[in-house]
Amino acid sequence: MFEVHVLASGSDGNCTVIQLDDEAIMIDAGISCRKTMELMEKEGVDHRCLKALLVTHEHSDHIAGAGPVSRKFNIPVMCNKATFDCSEIGDVEYNEIKTMGSFCVGSMNIIPLPTSHNAAEPNAFLVEADDKRVLVATDTGKFTFQLEHALKQADVAVIESNYDKKMLAEGPYPLYLKKLIASEIGHLSNVDCAGAIKRTMKDNRQIFLAHLSKTNNAPDIARETVAEMTGLKRLCIDCLEFPGDTRTLKVRG
């Protein structure tokens, strides 16, 4: 069974576990180790299955718990050198990976893909096993060629839908921050997320909208925008609804 456990997603912290039978990887650890353990238990994830912690980039909502999680579960941190050098994770086992250089963790083949974000060398991850593919792609101001190609292949896509353009424009953030968020090294809007999905339509692909801003977005608005632009049924588009919400997606055979 190939399962995707979204434990946290948003500006307050991000953490996803991808599990294949009795092997699992964690992508980002942006919440405390204690909270991570609580949410893993809630979703029925055995920490003994964890084989590695993959880090997308060095921002605190993705690495705040990385050091404690790595040490608690005795698993290596895996990311490119630029990300690790900026992360200040502490004393952990570190395994260097290369952007676009595939590697294996157990039975899973993983490809780090370049994203466009204001970080040292940010990555998304495409995870492959048994002819099934999961894409976890957040924190990007645009869909790179590599991301779009991966999205075409994905059976499950955990994809950023960070902000509603009107809410961002009329919201409380200072102008410089609004411009950064809306730039090509910022975040992906609901409209741009929908555009990427529409360009890469695939039957039976599961869509999970991730990294929704609590200030500049809302679950109903994100789902409605993506559904309207893509023609997908709203019930087929999932996301976390409230703080502490979690989700498990099972890859269809």
Image: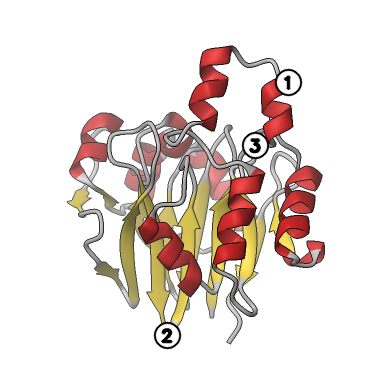
Q: Which residue is mark 2?
A: 130
Q: Counting residues from the N terminus, which is met first, the one under dot 1 or under dot 2?
A: 2
- The structure residue drawn at horizontal position 48% and vertical position 57%, both measured from the top left corner, is 136
Residue 73 shown left or right of residue 100 in the figure: right
Colour scheme in the image? secondary structure
Q: Which residue is mark 3?
A: 163
* Res. 23 visible in picture: yes
Which percent across, then down, holds residue 149? Answer: 41, 66
Q: Counting residues from the N terminus, which is met first, the one under dot 1 or under dot 3?
A: 3
Nearest to the eye among marks 1 and 2: give it: 1
Residue 103 shown left or right of residue 157 in the figure: left
Quadrant where the N terminus is found in the figure? bottom right
Q: Which residue is mark 1?
A: 170
Which percent across, then down, holds residue 43? Answer: 63, 60
* Res. 214 visible in picture: no
Circles 1 and 2: CB atoms closer than 8 Å: no
Q: Amino acid at mark 1?
A: Glu
Mark pair 1, 3: CA separation: 12 Å
Frontmost residue, 148 versus 113: 148
Q: Circle 3 — which element?
A: loop
Quadrant where the C terminus is found in the figure? bottom right
Q: Circle 1 — which element?
A: helix
Mark pair 1, 2: CA separation: 46 Å
- The structure residue drawn at horizontal position 65% and vertical position 36%, both measured from the top left corner, is 163
Q: Amino acid at mark 2?
A: Asp
- Mark 2: few/some/many CA within 10 Å (<14, 14-19, 20+): few
Q: Is residue 135 above or below residue 15?
A: below
- The structure residue drawn at horizontal position 43% and vertical position 53%, both measured from the top left corner, is 27
Q: Circle 2 — which element?
A: loop
Q: Amino acid at mark 3?
A: Tyr
Dividing the picture into quadrants, the one containing residue 250 is bottom right
